[in-house]
């Protein structure tokens, strides 16, 4: 019985330190912008639709920021002409690459934090910077696929993500580089 009381006291102490007992506790935003606090008083009720319009503009700005990028290319990548966002790490147990007779095969998987739409926009911007021509972009069942060409090689980039428990996203990027098939060479 005393152990239960001790556990209860610990929970109450943690809750009071976190501010739960005063009603001031809020869910963490984890890097996302928090919504503006609701306006109070007669001026707020007189404003009516103005407050709603402001919230809509804030949400739209947040969405535009999500889709417009924000990721930076790492200056140190395992393959010089395949861009990787800063903070993304190669998953070595499932990655491989071969160099034979002047041709290469690269099959790398990277994981990091970032919304897959932002990551897709990163690759749309940075693959041409590295000399790749984007031939096709498709989204099937929530997975983005970019097909690129450079010289006698093709590169297929696949982008998928899982929403994490506390917001944020864990995104997986797979880059597969191989020589073009004989019928594809121009």
Image (cartoon, rainbow, N blue to C red):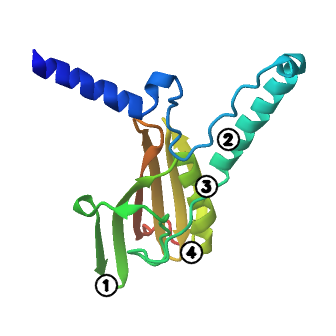
Q: Is residue 141 visible?
A: yes
**Marks 4 and 1: CB-CB under 8 Å?**
no
Q: Nearer the viewer, mark 4 or mark 1?
A: 4
Q: Is residue 183 visible?
A: no
| Pick the front one: 157 or 118 | 118
What label sits on residue 121 in the rendered view? 3
Local SS, label 3:
helix
Question: Within 10 angstroms of label 2, few (less than 14), some, or many (20 or more) residues?
Answer: few
Horizontal side, residue 44 vs residue 141: left or right: right
Horizontal side, residue 54 vs residue 63: left or right: right
Residue shown at 26% from the left, 64% from the top: 92
Q: CA distance from mark 2 to mark 1?
A: 47 Å
Residue that label 4 marks = 130
Who comes first in sequence, dot 4 or dot 2? 2
| Pick the front one: 142 or 98 | 142
Q: Nearer the viewer, mark 2 or mark 1?
A: 2
Question: Within 10 angstroms of label 1, few (less than 14), some, or many (20 or more) residues?
Answer: few
Image quadrant occupied by the N terminus: top left
Who comes first in sequence, dot 4 or dot 3? 3
Find residue 109 and report its image quarter: bottom left
Could you tell me residue 143's position as x and y percent? 48, 43
Find residue 106 and report its image quarter: bottom left
Q: CA distance from mark 4 to mark 3?
A: 15 Å
What label sits on residue 163 in the rendered view? none
Residue that label 2 marks = 63
Residue that label 1 marks = 101
Q: Nearer the viewer, mark 4 or mark 3?
A: 3
């Amino acid at each position: 019985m005393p152990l239960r009381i001790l556990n209860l006291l610990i929970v109450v102490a943690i809750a009071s330190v976190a501010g739960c007992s005063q009603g001031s506790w809020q869910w963490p935003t984890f890097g996302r912008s928090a919504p503006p606090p609701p306006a109070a008083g007669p001026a707020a009720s007189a404003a009516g639709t103005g407050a709603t319009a402001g919230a809509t503009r804030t949400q739209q700005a947040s969405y535009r920021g999500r889709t417009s990028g924000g990721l930076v290319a790492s200056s140190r990548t395992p393959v010089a002409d395949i861009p990787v966002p800063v903070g993304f790490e190669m998953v070595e147990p499932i990655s491989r690459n071969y160099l034979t007779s002047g041709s290469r095969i690269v099959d790398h998987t990277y994981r990091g934090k970032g919304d897959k739409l932002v990551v897709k926009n990163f690759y749309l911007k940075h693959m041409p910077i590295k000399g790749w021509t984007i031939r096709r972009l498709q989204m099937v069942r929530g997975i983005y696929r970019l097909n690129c060409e450079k010289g006698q090689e093709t590169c297929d980039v696949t982008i998928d993500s899982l929403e994490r428990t506390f917001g944020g996203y864990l995104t997986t990027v797979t880059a597969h580089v191989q020589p073009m098939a004989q019928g594809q060479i121009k």
